[in-house]
Image (tube, rainbow, N blue to C red):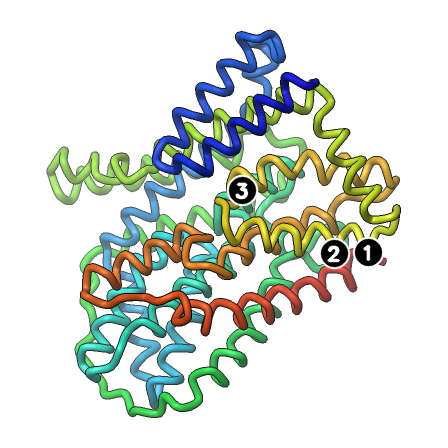
Amino acid sequence: MSLAIILFILTYLMLLALPRWRAPIALGSAALFIFLGLLSPQQALASVDLNVLLMIAGTMGIVSLFIDSQMPVLLADLILERTPDVKCAIVALALFAGIISAFVDNVATVLMIAPVALVIARRLKINPVTMVIAISVSSNLQGAATLVGDTPSILLGGYAGMDFLDFFFFKGKLGIFWAVELGAAVSAIVLLYLLRHETMPISAHKRTVVTDYMPTFLLTGTVLLLIGASFLPEKPALTNGLICLFMLGLGLIWTGFTKRSWAQVLMPLKEIDYATLALLSGLFIIIGGITHAGVVDVLAQCFVAAGADNPFLIYTLIVWASVLFSAFIDNIPYVAAMLPVVQGIAAMMGIEPYVLYFGLLSGATLGGNLTPIGASANITAIGILRKEGWTVKNRDFLRIGLPFTLSAVTAGYLLIWLIWGF
């Protein structure tokens, strides 16, 4: 067990210290777990959740086609036509970014919506920093709302055996979607208050033209098929992943038929984040290794001891510890490592793990909004602003990120416990 713990800690420290090399580090560590005999090759392969990897790959490719179609920008234009001033425009764009990110990767959402904010800022001759930050933090919030919203959600779905509809209604109760939406509503009110002085009127501008609606149909069809698959009894383990790949395949065929260009057909495949897929593959094996060595059971015992065997206290520790850790580290490896720990805690206490699962996901997803480096979407947003010549100071980010995070997490934290804690 000691060797597994040392290897796991060293791996995690290297993941933090060398973010550009995370995929090779994870794969190298996974290879060491096998080479040192901590996990057999068969056990390592069994640890990799292929369904999760296929879902992520398929969704990323479809999102690439969706972005290229300009449909998200058109939807943003339609919303802005109905906003009277800057304050309402920022909140509307933030809410819209949240809705999009419930079905599309958070970074992709920022890349879609942030340019609209920059156009508005240029036309009104105002600083775009607040607007882009609001879009970024809102996209991080809504990523936990659905199965396909963000990688940690897909990880939870795969680990807990949850389907698309289970995020809405699960075991006869409201799912995590409603806690996220309550957090979105509360944080929108907070944003309105923070931006109460931004009263400059908004003028109408030309709508973006969409020439290809097929990617929109593909994304919508993917969601509908995932919903339909939720009702299949004893479905194959790879069902969701194959659905996403099938819809991506249709998109590639359509692209080849309409654009007659191999470069255009291959573009969505190039947009898939293969480094993330490699990182997750390595993490699955590493977590399988520490679980097999008994490390997860020890961590679960520590949480139970710290929580004095009190479910509410343990739930509280998981939520707010996740917020704190995710403010400084990537939530993907954190959630991947903590899911088996949470399951172990629930098993020791003789309770169902779902309240702890939802607390982990909500805290880890939103914690990244506490700092500019806590989430990839925030880093992307700051990078976009930097390219436009705008500097984002820590106080600029904290002015939005801190109250947004605390209000959204608190609202979701209370609702999850009220639904699942009793």
**Dot 1 amino acid type:** Phe
Residue 255, image x and y in percent? 21, 42
Amino acid type at circle 2 is Thr
Name the residue beneath numbered marker 2: 316
**For residue 6, above or below residue 62:** above
Q: CA distance from mark 2 to mark 1?
A: 6 Å
Q: Quarter of the image containing the C terminus?
A: bottom right
Identified at 29% across, 41% down, the residue is 251
Q: Are marks 2 and 3 in contact (CB under 8 Å)?
A: no
The answer to whether one can see residue 292 in this image is yes
The residue closer to the viewer here, 346 or 31, is 31
Q: Amino acid at mark 3?
A: Ile
Q: In the displayed image of the protein, which residue is found farthest to the left?
A: 260
Against 234, is 91 above or below? Answer: below
Residue at the image point whose x is 70% and y is 60% from the top: 174
Circles 3 and 1 in contact, beta carbons < 8 Å: no
